[in-house]
Amino acid sequence: MGEYDIALCYFGLPRSVTHVAKTHEEFIYNVLDGNNLTYKKFMHTWKTGDDTQRVWRHKTREKINYDEYKLLAPDVYAIESQDEFMTTVDMGDYYYDTERKREWDRTLLKNHICALGSEKRVFEMMKESGDTFKYVIALRPDANFLKPLPVDKIFPIKHNEFVISDHRHYEGFNDRFMISNYSDAHIYLSRLDGMKEYRSEHGRITAEKYLKGTFKRHECLIKKVEFPFNLIRPDGSMSAN
């Protein structure tokens, strides 16, 4: 058991770590080191039955590279079957066929559910470690960061406050990067648990809309900071979204 300032929680498929790992080192790890902030890295990811992966609605030509995660050097790593996880999910709880014209794209919603499932699992890994943390950073392994983490504008963080990147909010809030106090991190990382109820009460789900609804439900404070990044596809190209 150890005491750290920050838990770095990676979730989801690695997709393009080979192309982006240096930006994580330069703009996050080195910045934290330079500010004498200690951290431990956790990573949860999925294995698919045929090793294929999707970017938005479409499968890519590139198979999942199950070794590239090592470039991020997580201290704790877990990989589980995405197909087995999906057998525990009833899509009817989140996607109403009777309202399909209003719903988000079914494949995109499925992608989002897998992302939230991975977030929940990495949160459990962090808790089970027995380590103590002041803060939690949730981030994707396929993010290409463009500027140093602005620690002077982030810390300290108030109770029930969540720091997010101020770009690409779409219908709600950017759901691809988050920093909070450890004591509040469950609101973000375990929000899959409340999605069925949200759909029944508030209609169609999109990733950003649901995050905004989660924050509203828990009366969270939102701090937006300039910390831009792009998501990179397995072939090294930049995602349009």
Image: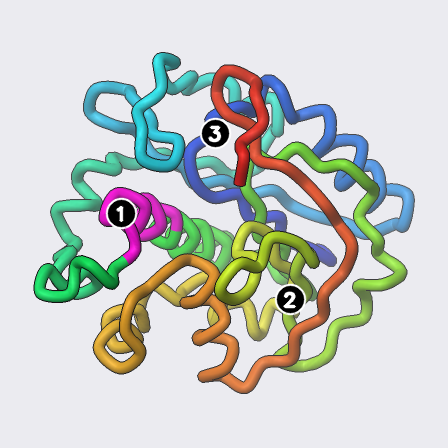
Q: Earlier in the sequence, mark 1 or mark 3?
A: 3
> Bounds of the magenta span?
104-115
Q: Earlier in the sequence, mark 3 or mark 2?
A: 3
Q: Secondary structure at mark 3?
A: loop
Q: How many marks?
A: 3
Kindly identify the residue that appears in the image at 68 percent across and 65 percent down.
163
Q: Measuring from the top left, give residue 15's x and y in whole percent.
A: 47, 26
Q: Amino acid at mark 3?
A: Pro
Q: Is residue 11 visible?
A: yes
Q: Measuring from the top left, give residue 84's x and y in whole percent.
A: 17, 40
Q: Earlier in the sequence, mark 2 or mark 1?
A: 1
Q: Which numbered dot is residue 14?
A: 3
Q: Residues within 10 Å of mark 3 (few under 14, many from 20)?
A: many
Distance in Å between CA atoms under marks 2 and 1:
26 Å
Q: Nearer the viewer, residue 16 or 31?
A: 16
128 magenta-colored: no
Q: Secondary structure at mark 1?
A: helix
- Foreground: disc 1 or disc 3: 1
Kindly identify the residue that appears in the image at 55 percent across and 64 percent down.
173
Q: Measuring from the top left, give residue 236's x and y in whole percent.
A: 56, 18
State the residue lying farthest toward the front: 101
Q: Which residue is mark 1?
A: 110
Q: Measuring from the top left, give residue 32's x and y in whole percent.
A: 81, 46
